[in-house]
């Protein structure tokens, strides 16, 4: 039986003059690695802009940039990075060309973006998106040094401070520079699954960060905000089969550690005990079974690895303020 073709998502990275290179390289490295980690979703990246060549924040020129397309395909993502006010190196474009290039990008965004197209801005890229009117009526954020300017450029937008990223419908905006990586990991988690986002974050040797008001992290990523390889091995085993009869001893063998040391490491790096982690993953599985099947309560408890429905409800109540039955009444 032939393999199912991956869902292809066109990604258009719009390169303004004096582009902040990390705004591009960080998020695109996330997508490159996500493509290598799975076969269900494939991100097809194209670099477009008003000029065939632009300079970057660190003085490195970027060439072979494609023109801004006349029409975007359905389901496309448009990524708008920021720009540096004072880049390194000799300028590739004049100040007048810089202004004309930004004006061309704003006009193109206003014309090309329609319902069904997701727009992601990184850092000061939100200023161009805001000037195009695409943030009107939406919550959004940007680099802390650009918040006031964004509020002036897009007075109809609801600009939020102290946020890593904001998702409001088809508008996704991030704060300064490296927050673009956090935003793209969030996008990958939604399209390819939390496990893929976690694998990419571990490859990049970064944490999965959240600010207080950011979108809620997936329950499958709870306790994974660390870089300890042995604990990740144990956690990978649990998430692959939460219903298995996991004990501290059996997971210590997976982690190549002693039970006592594993317990200490879990509390230190995952912020919870081994037993709590196993129960959290079982609750996450039970949540999916509740919303994705018509199994009765006893069957859900059994498939999620709990000894009884009572044990499941007790575990559920530790991390949820509402009863499990509400999961079905809300879908």
Image: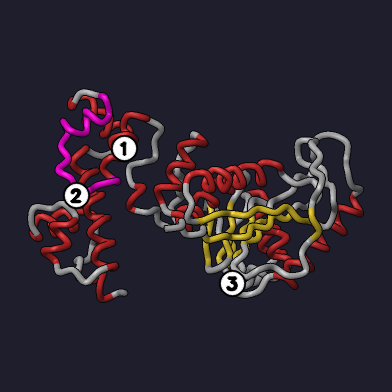
Which quarter of the rendered picture does the N terminus lie within? Answer: bottom left
Residue in view at x 37 percent, y 30 percent: 228
Q: Which mark is drawn over residue 243?
A: 2
Quarter of the figure with residue 288 = bottom left
- Seen in the image, is 176 located left or right of residue 65? left
Q: Residues within 10 Å of mark 1 (few under 14, many from 20)?
A: many
Measured Cα–Cα span from mark 3 to mark 1: 38 Å
Pick whichever of labels 2 and 3 is earlier in the sequence. 3
Q: Secondary structure at mark 1?
A: helix
Quarter of the figure with residue 224 = top left
* Residue sitting nearer the eye, 152 or 24: 24
Q: Secondary structure at mark 3?
A: loop
The range drawn in magenta is 239-256
Measured Cα–Cα span from mark 2 to mark 1: 20 Å
The residue at which mark 3 appears reads as 116
* Residue sitting nearer the eye, 188 or 92: 188
Q: Position of residue 175 (x, y in %)?
A: 59, 50
Q: Which mark is drawn over residue 270?
A: 1
Res. 214 visible in picture: no
Q: Which mark is drawn over residue 288?
A: none
The magenta stretch spans residue 153: no
């Amino acid at each position: 039986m032939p393999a199912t073709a991956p869902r292809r998502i066109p990604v258009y990275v719009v390169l303004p003059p004096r582009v902040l290179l990390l705004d591009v390289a960080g998020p695109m490295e996330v997508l490159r690695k996500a493509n290598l980690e799975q076969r269900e979703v494939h991100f097809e990246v194209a670099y477009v802009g008003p000029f065939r060549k632009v300079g970057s924040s660190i003085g490195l020129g970027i060439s072979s940039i494609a023109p801004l397309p006349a029409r975007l395909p359905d389901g496309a993502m448009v990524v708008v990075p920021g720009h540096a006010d004072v880049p390194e190196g000799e300028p590739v474009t004049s100040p007048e060309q810089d202004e004309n290039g930004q004006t061309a990008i704003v006009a193109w965004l206003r014309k090309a973006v329609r319902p069904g197209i997701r727009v992601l801005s990184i850092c000061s890229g939100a200023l161009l998106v805001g000037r195009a009117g695409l943030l009107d009526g939406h919550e959004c954020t940007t680099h802390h040094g650009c918040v006031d300017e964004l509020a002036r450029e897009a007075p109809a937008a609801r600009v939020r401070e102290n946020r890593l990223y904001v998702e409001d419908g088809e508008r996704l905006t991030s704060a300064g520079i490296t927050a673009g990586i956090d935003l793209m990991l969030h996008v990958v988690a939604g399209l390819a699954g939390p496990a893929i986002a976690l694998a990419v974050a571990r490859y990049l040797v970064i944490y999965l960060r959240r600010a207080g008001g950011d979108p809620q992290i997936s329950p499958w990523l709870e306790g994974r905000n660390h870089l300890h390889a042995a604990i990740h091995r144990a956690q990978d085993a649990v998430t692959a089969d939460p219903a298995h009869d996991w004990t501290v001893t059996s997971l210590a063998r997976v982690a190549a550690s002693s039970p006592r040391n594993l317990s200490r490491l879990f509390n230190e790096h995952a912020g919870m005990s081994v037993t709590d982690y196993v129960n959290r993953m079982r609750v996450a599985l039970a949540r999916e079974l509740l919303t994705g099947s018509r199994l009765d309560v006893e069957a859900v408890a059994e498939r999620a690895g709990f000894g009884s429905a009572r044990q499941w409800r007790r575990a559920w109540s530790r991390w949820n303020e509402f009863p499990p039955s509400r999961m079905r009444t809300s879908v």
